Each structure stands twice: as structure tokens, then as C-alpha cells.
Image (tube, helix red, strand yellow):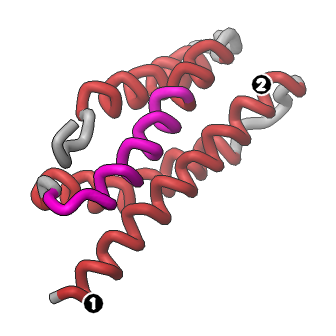
Amino acid sequence: MNGEIDLELFTLAIIQLNNAFQKLSENDTDIKESLDSSYEYLNELSQSLEDILKEDEINATEVELFSTYALNIFPEYKTQLANLENLDDDLNESVINLIEVFDKLYKIADDYFKNRMVIM
């Protein structure tokens, strides 16, 4: 990937997650597939980000934009997910997986800025 974030993967993850929230707003609780797809995309993205940040050269602008987004927006997604009620066990597991991957991405973003400050 040459030090660049797969923005298409990220976009797909957010679309799937937003689709799930849209379905919920329409009282459609058939959202497991959307949540699981979002988790898979975000998990792949987190692994990719970890690899990117180990490279000698990265696209700093892209990483900084993503990290800023992660630090500002991901807590809101986590809150929305944590506030979902009356979930069956399978759906609850999907929500927990997503919360955990958001935590992981948040930590990657936070660590990126902390490490950048040390280097500067």
C-alpha cells in the first residue's frame, strides 16, 4: 500500500455502519450483517494502519487526517453502539466487536499523535 491508508476500505466500513443505524431508525433490527461487515473492514484497516506506521515513509497528511477523524468521530460511534438496547446475543457480540475495533483505531490514532510530538 506504500504508506497510504486504504480510504476505500474505510469508506465501506462507515457506509455499512451508517446503514445499520439507518435501519435501526426505521425499526428494522436486521443489522447484524451490516455491523459485521463494518467490523471486518475496520479490523482490516486497523491491521493495515499498524503496518503503515511501521514503514519508513508514510503519507503523513493522510494519516493525520484519518487520526484526527478517529479521535473526534469514533467516540460518537462507540456511544451510539453502547446505547443500543434489547439486543440478542449474536447482535450484542457484533456490537462489542465494533466497539473494540473502534477502541483499537482510537488508540492507534492517539499513539500516532503522541509519537509525532516526541519526534518533532
Q: For mark 2, what is the residue?
A: 91
* Left or right placement of residue 52 versus residue 32 in this view: left
Instruction: Identify which residue is drawn at 61% across, 39% down.
Output: 98
Decide which of 90, 79 is in the foreground and name it.
90
Q: For mark 1, what is the residue?
A: 118
Examine the rendered structure and indicate whether residue 4 appears above or below residue 34: below
Element under disc 1: helix
* Left or right placement of residue 31 versus residue 48 in this view: right
Instruction: Identify which residue is drawn at 57% across, 46% down.
Output: 101
Secondary structure mostly seen in magenta is helix
Query: Which residues, given as a range, are shown in magenta?
Result: 40-57
- Quadrant location of the C terminus in the rendered image: bottom left
Residue type for callout 2: Leu
Q: Mark 1 Cα within 10 Å, few/some/many (few <14, many 20+)?
A: few
Marks 2 and 1 sit apart, C-alpha to C-alpha, by: 41 Å
**How far across and how far down the image is residue 74, in percent?**
45, 52
Residue type for callout 1: Val
- The tally of labels here is 2
**How far across and how far down the image is residue 34, in percent?**
56, 17
Tag in front: 2 or 1: 1
